[in-house]
């Protein structure tokens, strides 16, 4: 295991090899095999070429990976690699998903319901109230709350999650050997000890430099079912995260504010430009995501199945949808074991046969 980890860490250290190129390489061989492969083999892989293949062939700094492992052991940090079963599947579907994640805590990164809550560092009382109401609503469906551990809306969302006994995950823009801001160290420890945790793609010693935050934001946007924006200006990290979530085809919600309030200008802009759904009431969020608990009468669907010959792929999806009232597309992709195209094709056929209904928020249920 230690040998595997050395090569996995090393892959993140090779010059000219980013997360996109690493994903391409891992489609052809394991991390260790990448470093033992011939340059002539690597350079023929589409998206790699001679320059990147040369960077891999010349890499000799494995001692840096060994040093990192010692620091991880000292600070009780573990890793989640791109090909590990525990890697967040929602994030895996994003083209630029990180090669390696560092983690503190035992949070489940693949729970059925996960939402990110983001916003300004200098919130108003209105922003605080809205955040706390949303967290309270999410407690009814046992969702995990993700944010960035920053001042303002981030911290309020983490605290509200803890108050409602929900797991909460902080995604950081620096190494996990520290907590920034330091004032949130006690809260971070509580998050770790109550089923949540801390997550980062940055190694120990990496400081919270400004250029790290956009990279952090893509994880926040990519690993959740939906992103909720509460109070933000028209520029800043929250707007970047919302844009990323849209690019990843994720649901984005925004809490509206007064037209004269600069702190809500970003939320109002997202709504006006149709990049976010207006969120007036936390209960609407649960409904739009298809997470409300209902008692369904499924007898008619079961009877129709007797007269329709389902393919193996369609049968897998129907069986999944029988388990709960509505299932998000990401959960179907995660649990079905089918390719994304296979899921899409099977769902389309089931809809055409009136066996499955498509709901708002990328949810599906039996008809």
Image: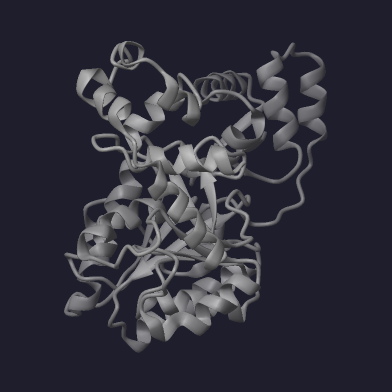
For the point 64% across and 60% down, the residue is: 106
**Who is closer to the viewer here, 297 or 8?**
8
Residue in the image at 55% along x and 19% along y = 342
Q: 363 or 107: which is nearer to us?
A: 107
Based on the displayed image, in which of its 4 quarters is residue 267 positioned?
bottom left
Q: State left or right for residue 296 relative to residue 209.
A: right
Q: Residue at x 62, y 70 (%)?
A: 166
Residue at 70% in and 36% down: 321
- Give the quadrant of residue 317: top right
Which image quarter holds the N terminus? top right
Camera-side residue of 367 and 98: 98
Image location (x, y in percent) of residue 20: 33, 33
Q: Is residue 64 left or right of residue 361?
A: left
- Image location of residue 148, percent across then percent down: 40, 67
Where residue 31 appears, as percent x and y from the top left, is 47, 31
Q: Is residue 59 visible?
A: yes
Q: Is residue 218 above or below residue 304?
A: below
The image shows residue 96 at horizontal and vertical percentages of: 34, 39
Q: Nearer the viewer, residue 285 or 224?
A: 224
How are the colours assigned in the image? one colour
The quarter of the rendered structure image containing the C terminus is: top right
Image-based side of 84 in relation to 299, left or right: left
Total count of labels: 0
Q: Quadrant of residue 147?
A: bottom left
Residue 363 visible (yes or no): no
Q: Is residue 28 above or below residue 94?
A: above
């Amino acid at each position: 295991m230690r040998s595997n980890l050395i090569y996995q860490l090393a892959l993140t250290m090779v010059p000219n090899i980013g997360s996109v190129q690493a994903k391409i390489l891992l489609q052809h061989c394991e991390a260790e095999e990448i470093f033992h492969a011939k340059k002539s083999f690597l350079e023929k892989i589409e998206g790699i070429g001679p320059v990147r293949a040369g960077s891999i062939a010349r890499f000799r700094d494995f001692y840096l990976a060994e040093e990192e492992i010692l620091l991880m052991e000292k600070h009780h940090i573990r890793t989640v690699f791109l090909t590990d079963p525990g890697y967040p599947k929602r994030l895996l579907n994003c083209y630029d998903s990180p090669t390696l994640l560092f983690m503190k805590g035992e949070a489940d990164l693949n729970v059925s319901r996960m939402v990110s809550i983001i916003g300004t560092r200098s919130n108003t009382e209105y922003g605080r109230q809205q955040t706390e109401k949303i967290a309270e609503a999410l407690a009814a469906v046992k969702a995990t709350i993700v944010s960035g551990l920053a001042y303002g809306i981030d911290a309020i969302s983490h605290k509200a999650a803890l108050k409602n006994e929900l797991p909460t995950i902080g995604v950081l823009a620096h190494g996990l050997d520290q907590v920034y801001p330091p004032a949130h160290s006690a809260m971070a420890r509580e998050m770790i000890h109550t089923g949540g945790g801390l997550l980062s793609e940055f190694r120990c010693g990496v400081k919270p430099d400004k250029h790290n935050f956009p990279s952090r934001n893509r994880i926040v946007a990519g690993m959740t079912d939906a992103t909720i924006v509460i109070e933000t200006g028209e520029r800043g990290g929250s707007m970047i995260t919302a844009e990323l979530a849209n690019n990843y085809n994720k649901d984005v919600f925004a809490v509206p504010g007064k037209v004269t309030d600069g702190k809500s200008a970003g939320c109002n802009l997202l709504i006006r430009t149709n990049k976010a759904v207006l969120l007036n009431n936390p209960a609407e969020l649960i409904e739009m995501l298809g997470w409300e608990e209902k008692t369904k009468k499924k007898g008619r669907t079961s009877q129709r199945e007797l007269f329709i010959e389902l393919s193996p792929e369609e049968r897998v999806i129907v069986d999944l949808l029988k388990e709960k009232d509505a299932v998000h597309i990401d959960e179907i992709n995660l649990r079905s074991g089918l390719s994304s195209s296979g899921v899409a094709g099977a769902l389309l056929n089931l809809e055409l046969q009136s066996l499955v209904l498509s709901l708002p928020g990328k949810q599906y249920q039996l008809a």
